[in-house]
Amino acid sequence: QLKTGDYKEIDTLTKTFTGMTKALEERERHGRKSMLILETIDNGVLAFNKETLEITTFNHTCEYYFNIEKEKALGLTILTLMRRNLNFKAFIEQTPLFNMIQDGVESEKVEFECVINNEPHHFLTSIMILPKLSHEEEAEDILFVFNDLSEKREMEKQLINTEKLKAVGQLAASFAHEIRNPLTTIHGFMQLFHELEAKESEKKAHYELLLKEIERVNGIIQEMLDMANPRRTNEPKHVRIDTLINEVVLLFEQKAISSNVIIDVQIDETPYFLINDAKLRQVFMNIVKNAIEAMESGGELLIALTLDKKNQVMKIVFSDTGIGMSDETLKKVSTPFFTTKETGTGLGLMTSYRIIEELGGTIEVESEEEMGTTFILTIPFPSTVR
């Protein structure tokens, strides 16, 4: 038979168990919430035991970069995973992890470049030793939190490049205005002398050469002016991009035939866009001209246009089977005055980059030596379409 005091003791125990159960449920809820956050953030999160080096945390971002499922990674040691996974090995070797363990350093932040899945990435990584949460734990955990800064660094490079273009543009404008006037005068007098002494064949040949050289200098100045201020070209008007491309192809038809180059145009009829056709024409002409000149022994130039109505962008691809470019040349392709041609100025492609940037678009270049080059132009739809 239970006494009154026994009931009170049972009631106290019941309340205690109820409180413990609620505390455990709350702890479990917080644990699930923490795991949900861990699995949804873009940062990579990796943790492992300091003594055994066994991996204890491996979130979805780690799965993506190291191309291994979480279930297969958990429980493995860092060294085992490094032996089995080249991406993981390349990543860990760029960090001061083992030096930190040896020297007893508690935290460190490091930024480095690393090739993952055959692509270069720029990582910012924080490494810290987590304190033990309880006395029962055998050892501390070491936590990795990493963030891929590749896009940010690329944007910074583009910003720096844009500032360089502005500086060169200002220089080009100043240079062009200073030199163009005397060139015009010289050109006028040379034409006059040529007409007056047309019968003297030897002098005539010299004059013709001088005229050609002056025209060439004038052409360089024009390119520098276009580079300095591409906005000064014609006002926007309603044009069809497919028509514009076909007109440019027609302009280079004879040059392509004489170079044994086949131009394959695969474009559908496009709507009328309100856009500056003079700017786009200049870009198309620069790329087509370079492509044909890169195929001295003949080849094929593919021009394709697609409209992405969902994302409101047009994508124009120029792909040739020419000599291609090395990685080093590819890095300099938009650099002012850089050219691999004897008679080139190195301003045509730079101007093209500037024009597409003015239109809010981008130019991507893919190239492989002896295989060819592909230019991919991505341009937002203009606001007015009919």
Image (spheres, rainbow, N blue to C red):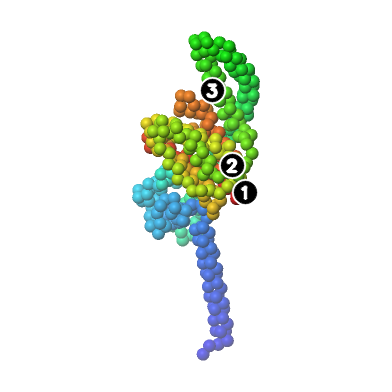
Instruction: Note whether 132 is above or below 192 in the view shown.
Output: below
Residue 148 shown left or right of residue 322 in the figure: right
Amino acid tagged 2: Leu
Query: Disc 2 versus disc 3: distance between alpha carbons?
Result: 29 Å
User: What element does badge 3 sit on?
Assistant: helix
Q: Nearer the viewer, residue 114 or 206?
A: 206
Q: Which of marks 1 and 3 is nearer the N terminus?
A: 3
Q: Pointer 2: what residue?
A: 359
Q: Nearer the viewer, mark 2 or mark 3?
A: 3
> At which x and y percent is residue 108?
51, 45
Residue drawn 55% across and 45% down? 240
Label 2, label 1: how far apart the Cα atoms are: 14 Å
Q: Is residue 377 left or right of residue 86?
A: right
Report the amino acid beneath label 1.
Thr
Q: Where is residue 383 in the image (x, y as percent from the top left)?
A: 62, 48
Which mark's residue is nearer the viewer, 2 or 1? 1
Q: Position of residue 168 (x, y in %)?
A: 59, 29
